[in-house]
Amino acid sequence: MAEATAGEEVYVRLREFLDAMPGGFPATTSGVEIRILRKLFTPEHASMVMCMTRDLESPAAIAQRRAVTEEEAEDILEAMAARGLIGRVTKGGEIRYRAEQFLVGIYELQGRDIDREFSQLIEEYIPYLGLSWASLKTDQMRVVPVASAVDVTPEIATYDRIRDLVKSQGTMGVCECLCSKQQGFLGNDCRYPLEKCMVFDEDIDFYIENGFPMRRIDLDEALQLLDRSEELGLVLRPDNAQEIRFVCSCCSCCCPSLRFLKAFPNPGDLMHSNYRSTIDPDRCDTCAVCIERCPMDAIVEGEEFMEINRARCIGCGVCLPACPQDAISLVLREDAAVPPRDWEETLHRIAVERGLS
């Protein structure tokens, strides 16, 4: 990229700041990443966020670093949080703020303000992010089996039982899928419901009050949403932790990571999942319903029964409830692993793998 002008210099530094976070924000030859930052951040907001850390801090602490008054800092921080540019957490009645990585983080909070320009920029930039994650052992998100898989695969671990994970949450909300909205702006309308991703955030009322496309739900509705996702054949993807913060219901037509990995010959080897599907040849009647359901084209028709391409299967289990002969079940992968304890441990592992301090 050409040498930055004075007006771009703050965004170049912001790009470097975000790239030093676990999720990364790599540079490109086209400079698309700088165009994304210019669209999201004013110079004032860019300068403010670079005075923050990933630790939750008071406005006073951040104000001292930015050399402004506490009141000025609080006004700027609230405005930035209302635009989904930083994290905001209320604990014990006190509000704290932290810098967020781009993805998973800032990107997911742009559902209110997304437009065609932003969608085009993200579409151009996503492959660079995907390639930067390809060599990492730890993923930010993982795949868990649909609920009905538990009935036929009792070996599914507690941290992979999606209904139990959701039942353990307190504050619950559902939001519109930003990935599907993005594809809609690009002329690729999703055939699935837009409101399908769940979040578990004590500050959800703040986002609702500021016009973010989300709403509160109770446990009954949360479980109904899981059932609907299973019925529709959507892939359930929470954060890669035992204590989850969100659950995305992903389709391979819109989800950037599913679309990116589907283009490879071995998405099953590249996506974090503890299971693979298997087909009982004695039960299979080659009806081919499972082929239509598989988001990764991992099921093929054999001479006498359907067969699983192990390199393509991501263990989502969406083929199980569709099989009229109950011929499909899940088996534990040889490389199955216990996920990190929580989101912070997940990001710490990624940071270590990227060589970040």
Image (cartoon, helix red, strand yellow):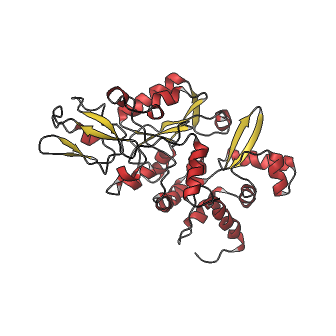
How far from the left and from the top, in percent, is residue 311?
31, 51
Q: Quadrant of the C terminus?
A: bottom right
**Which residue is the extreme one toward the bottom?**
3
> Residue 22 location, x and y as percent?
59, 55
Residue 12 quadrant:
bottom right
Q: Is residue 151 above or below residue 70?
A: above
Q: Residue furthest top?
A: 220
Task: From the viewer's side, name the closer residue of 94 and 242.
Answer: 242
Q: Residue 94 in the image: state x and y as whole percent.
A: 78, 36
Q: Pick the residue in front: 122 or 308.
A: 308
Taking the image as drawn, is residue 140 in sight?
Answer: yes
User: Where is the N terminus found, in terms of image quarters?
Assistant: bottom right
Residue lying furthest left: 303
Residue at 12% of width from left, 45% of height from top? 303
**Residue 112 shows in the view:** no
Marker count (numbered): 0
Image location of residue 36, percent across then percent down = 59, 60
Residue occupying the point 60% across, 77% down: 2
Drawn side of residue 47 relative to residue 126, left or right: right
Residue lying furthest right? 69
Specify whether 191 is left or right of 33.
left
Quadrant of residue 322 within the rendered picture? top left
> Foreground residue, 209 or 153?
153
